[in-house]
Image (cartoon, rainbow, N blue to C red):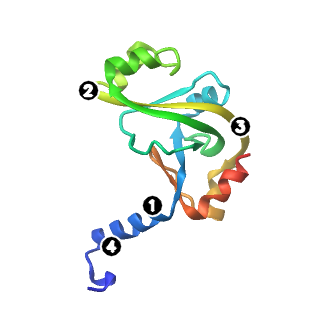
């Protein structure tokens, strides 16, 4: 059956799968609230916590930091040391001093979750902000809700974020 005859949802899934397959497999873009992005790029916060992440992708090497609204810009990049998936108690014990999150905020964020993810980062590099309008015009960029692989057409962003 020709692809144009498939249901729309299936066509979109095939298109997204092909785009992911062609993406730069070792680099991601991660959306972070501006206050936390600044702590990461300042070297204070070395762990980003996520309710969901894809920990089997242990080959991730680099993350571009997209500071969400109101900054709406890529403002730097970090090296990914490791991604750890663990139960909430172990995650807190290992990251409490690295994540810059209070116990109350941690508990509230992970409420009703049995496990979570910690992304361990190093080598923060701040860049001139690459604003969303520029990213959209040059790369047809869509900011991730949480994180996503860098698409092949976006790989020049890795050099722009130097």
Q: CA distance from mark 3 to mark 1?
A: 27 Å
Measured as percent of width and height from the top left, residue 45 is found at 58, 24
Q: Are marks 3 and 1 in contact (CB under 8 Å)?
A: no
User: Is the C-beta separation of discs 3 and 2 under 8 Å?
Assistant: no
Residue 77 locus on image (x, y percent): 64, 41
Cα distance in 3D space between marks 3 and 2 = 34 Å
Q: Residue at x 54, y 50 (%)?
A: 26
Viewer-nearest of discs 1 and 4: 1
For mark 2, give the secondary structure. loop
The x, y position of residue 151, in whole percent, is 54, 60
Numbered disc in front, either 3 or 1: 1
Closest to the camera, between mark 4 and mark 2, is: 2
Q: Classify 31 as above or below 133.
A: above
Q: Which residue matches tag 4?
A: 11
Marking on residue 20: 1
Taking depth in this image into account, of 142 and 2 the one nearest to the observer is 2
Labels 4 & 3 near each other (Cβ < 8 A): no
Mark 1 to mark 4: distance in Å?
A: 14 Å
Q: Is residue 15 left or right of residue 158?
A: left
- Side of 157 where 98 appears, left or right: left
Give whichever of discs 4 and 3 has the lower sequence position. 4
Q: Quadrant of residue 136?
A: bottom right
Name the foreground residue: 138 vs 25.
25
Q: Which mark is residue 114?
A: 2
Evaluate if marks 4 and 2 touch, with contact meaning CB atoms under 8 Å apart.
no
The image's mark for residue 55 is: none
Q: Earlier in the sequence, mark 1 or mark 4?
A: 4
State yes or no: discs 1 and 2 in contact (Cβ < 8 Å).
Answer: no
């Amino acid at each position: 059956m020709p692809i144009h005859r498939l249901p729309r949802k299936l066509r979109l899934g095939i298109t997204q799968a092909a785009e992911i397959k062609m993406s730069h497999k070792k680099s991601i873009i991660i959306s972070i609230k501006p206050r936390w992005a600044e702590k990461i790029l300042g070297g204070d916060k070395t762990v980003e916590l996520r309710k969901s992440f894809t920990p089997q992708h242990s080959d991730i090497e680099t993350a571009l930091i997209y500071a969400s609204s109101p900054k709406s810009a890529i403002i730097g990049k970090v090296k990914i040391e490791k991604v750890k998936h663990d139960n909430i108690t172990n995650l807190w014990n290992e990251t409490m001093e690295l994540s810059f999150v209070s116990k109350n905020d941690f508990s509230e964020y992970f409420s009703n979750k049995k496990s979570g993810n910690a992304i361990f980062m190093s080598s923060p590099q701040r860049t001139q902000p690459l604003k969303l309008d520029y990213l959209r015009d040059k790369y047809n960029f869509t900011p991730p809700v949480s994180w996503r692989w860098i698409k092949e057409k976006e790989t020049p962003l890795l050099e722009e974020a130097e």
